[in-house]
Image (spheres, helix red, strand yellow):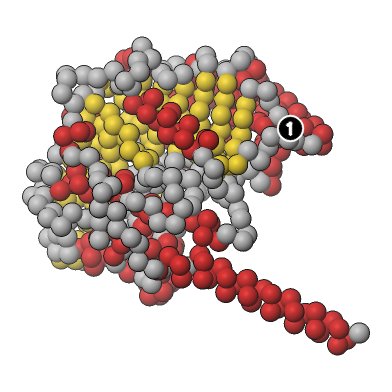
């Protein structure tokens, strides 16, 4: 008997070891093979992002404050008449999430057709939120799907994550940026893990067809119908349907009570026509929907525009990991004479130790560009992703300056031609620079003041520096 048990255990260990080797080979080693270059898949010239008219049909609103961004989402849902399309990386538990879900259910009750697409691994609808899946999917006017669910025997698919944060309503309103649905992004009273993020709202007053919102919706349609997307809730069991009804009743009740008590979050009052800014043009760009290495369309677009900048380039990204794969996709003649300013997190503020260790390993490369490099060093962390070129073109969306965003995730941004909006965005970035440390300028490091040194955690800094010695070899996954 004992021999049989030992043999069984040995067999299990062999199977686990073989599976581990299979995962390493197909989820790690496979991605170190050279990627075939696709020279024919070019990006647009900078002129394609510049408007020829004084104004276009799209007006924009910078959403810098997290609570105001939540209010904007709430009003979009409440204003919806026909359709709401949503694609998000995740939804997490919290009062703002529950009230927004309640608003979605109320919209569905009045006949609005709603489609919700979430990442298939990181969607967040587990644990206390597991019943939310059934509450949404069991409603006749709501469809819920997952993009690229977990496939244990296809480890190469684990990297193919949906990282977009997009919502469109009736072809009239759209929102895109870096915020997921959670209190850490939207709460009025910031939790401990709160992050400073950024979105942009787009308003197409007359619902005209040449609006960028329709480009965004076309992309959502492509994601929605793609073979990588699964309709895993098309056939709910009786038990799941009952759980969904109970959760739906709870969310609807919570939303109704908030409306009755005139809670601020469910009573936004925003006049889109007066609060938004006119634009000359708004363009939508996104990565291809592919597994393995994607053609880095968003990255190439951003650097191709930068190559033609003459005055200034302002960059804010929570994670900056200038791996060799990114540098290979920089134009050979980078003739930009612009002054570059780069803002990212610091040892003090970063919540993502893996990404920050990758940045530490390659920070010398950033310094060698001659840019002014700032690290945010105050309370909470930065999560906004933006670029401003020559105080005119602005890019806002979900794209981080790392290999994962360039080659592995789905990512999307809008490029806005508006000097007024660019001025607002530069002001928002500079407000965070005021709470940051200048790390390097003109290819040289700058010693931080003693008081700022003391703010850094010695143990966290030591750990991150040690970790960077390892992650430098894994930067294509960061």
Judge from the rendering whether residue 30 lies leftward or rightward of residue 205; answer left or right: right
Observer able to see residue 34 = yes
Most foreground residue, 306 or 380: 306
Check the image and report above or below for 367 versus 285: below
Residue 348 percent location from the top left of the image: 38, 59
Most foreground residue, 276 or 167: 167
Residue 208 percent location from the top left of the image: 35, 15
Observer able to see residue 67 = no
Q: Write the residue at 33% across / 22% down.
A: 211
Residue 164 percent location from the top left of the image: 44, 41
Picture quadrant of residue 476: bottom left
Residue to which mark 1 is pinned: 244
Judge from the rendering whether residue 343 lies leftward or rightward of residue 269; answer left or right: left
Q: Write the residue at 17% across / 38% down.
A: 46
Residue 101 percent location from the top left of the image: 60, 29
Q: Residues within 10 Å of mark 1 (few under 14, many from 20)?
A: many
Q: Which quarter of the rendering shows the N terminus? A: bottom right
In the orientation shown, which residue stands out farthest toward the right?
A: 1
Element at badge 1? helix
Q: Which quarter of the rendering shows the C terminus? A: bottom left
Q: Write the residue at 74% across / 32% down.
A: 244
Check the image and report above or below for 242 versus 309: above
């Amino acid at each position: 008997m004992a021999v049989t048990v030992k043999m069984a255990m040995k067999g299990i260990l062999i199977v686990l070891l073989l599976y581990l080797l299979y995962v390493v080979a197909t989820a790690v080693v496979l991605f170190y093979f050279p990627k075939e270059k696709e020279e024919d898949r070019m990006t647009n010239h900078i002129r394609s992002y510049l408007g020829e008219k004084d104004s276009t049909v799209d007006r924009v609103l910078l959403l810098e404050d997290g609570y105001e961004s939540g209010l904007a989402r709430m009003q979009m849902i409440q204003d919806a008449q026909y359709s709401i399309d949503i694609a998000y990386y995740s939804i997490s538990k919290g009062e703002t999430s529950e009230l927004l879900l309640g608003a979605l259910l109320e919209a569905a009750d009045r006949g609005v057709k709603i489609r919700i697409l979430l990442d298939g691994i990181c969607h967040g609808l587990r644990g206390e939120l597991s019943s939310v899946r059934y509450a949404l999917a069991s409603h006749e006017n709501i469809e819920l799907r997952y993009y690229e669910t977990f496939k244990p025997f296809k480890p190469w698919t684990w990297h193919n994550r949906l990282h977009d944060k997009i919502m469109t309503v009736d072809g009239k309103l759209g929102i895109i940026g870096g915020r997921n649905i959670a209190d850490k992004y939207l709460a009025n009273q910031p939790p401990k893990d709160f992050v400073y993020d950024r979105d942009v709202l787009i308003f197409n007053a007359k619902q005209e067809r040449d609006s960028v919102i329709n480009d965004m919706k076309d992309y959502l349609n492509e994601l929605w119908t793609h073979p990588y997307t699964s309709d895993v809730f098309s056939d709910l069991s009786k038990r799941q349907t009952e759980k969904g009804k109970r959760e739906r009743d709870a969310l609807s009740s919570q939303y109704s009570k908030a409306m009755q008590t005139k809670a601020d979050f469910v009573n936004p009052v925003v006049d889109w026509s007066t609060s938004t800014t006119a634009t000359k043009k708004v363009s939508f760009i996104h990565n291809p929907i592919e597994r393995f290495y994607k053609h880095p369309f968003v990255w190439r677009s951003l650097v191709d525009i930068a190559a033609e900048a003459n005055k200034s380039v302002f960059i804010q990204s929570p994670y900056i990991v200038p791996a060799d794969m990114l540098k290979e996709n920089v134009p050979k003649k980078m003739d930009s004479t612009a002054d570059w300013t780069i803002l990212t997190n610091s040892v003090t503020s970063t919540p993502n130790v893996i990404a920050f260790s990758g940045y530490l390993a390659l920070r010398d490369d950033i310094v060698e560009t001659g840019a002014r490099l700032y690290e945010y060093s105050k309370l909470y962390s930065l999560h906004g992703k933006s670029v401003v070129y020559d105080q005119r073109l602005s890019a806002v969306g979900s794209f981080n300056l790392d290999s994962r965003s360039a080659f592995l995730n789905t990512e999307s941004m809008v490029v806005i031609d508006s000097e007024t909006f660019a001025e607002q965005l530069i002001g928002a970035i500079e407000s965070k620079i005021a709470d940051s440390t200048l790390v390097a300028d003109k290819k040289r490091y700058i010693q931080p003041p003693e008081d700022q040194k003391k703010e850094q955690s010695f143990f966290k800094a030591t750990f991150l520096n040690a970790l960077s010695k390892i992650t430098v070899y894994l930067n294509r996954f960061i």
